[in-house]
Amino acid sequence: MRNILLFDVDGVLIYPEGYKVALRRTIGYFGSLMGHPPIHFTDDEISIFEACGLTNEWDSAAFAVGLMLTQALAEHPNLQADTLEGTFANIRQSANPYPRRDFVSHVREVAARNSNGDAPTSHALAYLQEFANHPFLPLFLGDIYSLDTPTTRIQQVHTLGSDGFARTYGLPAPFETESTLLVYDVPLLSESSKATLFNWRNQPDHDFVVFTARPSLPPRDADSDPLGYAPEGDFAVDLLGFHDVPLIGAGRMQWIASHYNRTPGEYIKPYPVQALAAMGAAISGKEAESLHAAAILFEQKRLTGPLAELIHQPNRVTVFEDSTGGIRATRLAVELLRGAGVEIEFQAIGVSPHADKQAALRQVANQVVDDVNKGLNAIINMVE
């Protein structure tokens, strides 16, 4: 039997303190534009956002800032101006008190409306529009993947640093700052577990891959201009020392989506194309070819490229995830493969020390562990 392991990055392989710092700074940046005191978005709030499906900081920042703006305008509609900047100025200059918002209760309302576990952005937008349907909400939650989205742009400045932002996008950063990813991220995978994992991979029909919603460069084996592709997933594999491990990040999905007239959000987890591409890349090492094979199976229900190799023997895929979306994506991918005649087993290991996230993961995972090292050792001992 062929065994394939899929690893998420943030909360699984890496403790994403860099993203958390960037998210706090982004929310604080817009809070200051509205005259709010420091907000100090907490680790618990971030974990609850993730448990509620907002695992992408672009979603989290857009929703948090959108909530602050919307509630201010719901309470004082006369502060709305013709422009977003003018509205921020009116709120900042008003004498009205603005208490710290209860982000958690509102994000739980969004989750309650998203029972299918879809990408949360449209649900977050619809929820906030019920409070005050002002024209600025779509600027934040219309397309979180666009650099024109105010929160996404500021999040990227903090994440990449001002120099990295300029290199990535060919645009000047609005202020000078460090890269929070390069300064604050730390591995969760221990060196002993890493050695065990690579030794396991040396056995026949044992493969693993990294798949993440982090932005990334285009496929390594594609001749593509990297301008506009943020190398955040690539930072992660470098930090881990996974130099020869395939990476299927959001930049890879952006690249393949452009070939099939799709948006990246239609292919990235919780939807199955990213997980399909990850499986193909794991067994072949061919990122671009696996991305095409995944899109073709999704769009045309045909097995091609590396995914066609799965037809020749039984397979088992195990996904290590800290969010329900990645598990759902992999399960959907397995269902597509079974529909194409592939014999494949599926199991999911939920990874989180946080009670809210564990509760969500237990709904979709076979096993939930506090950290990836425990889960990895159990799985490797089982499949050896």
Image (cartoon, grey):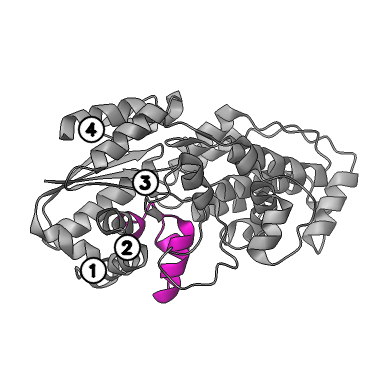
Going from the N terminus, do you reach mark 4 or mark 2 first? Answer: 2
SS label for mark 1 = helix
Q: Is residue 148 visible?
A: no
Q: In this view, does 89 lie to the left or right of 108?
A: right
**Front disc: 1 or 3:** 1
Give the CA distance from mark 1 to mark 3.
23 Å
| Disc on res. 380 | 4
Give the CA distance from mark 4 to mark 2.
24 Å
Residue 88 position, x and y percent, is 81, 51
Q: Which quadrant of the view contains residue 356?
A: top left
Going from the N terminus, do you reach mark 2 or mark 3 first? Answer: 2
For the point 81% across and 64% down, the residue is 82
Residue where numbered disc 2 is placed: 286
Q: Which quadrant of the view contains residue 191?
A: top left
Give the CA distance from mark 2 to mark 3.
21 Å
Give the CA distance from mark 4 to mark 3.
20 Å
Q: Which amino acid does label 2 sit on?
A: Lys
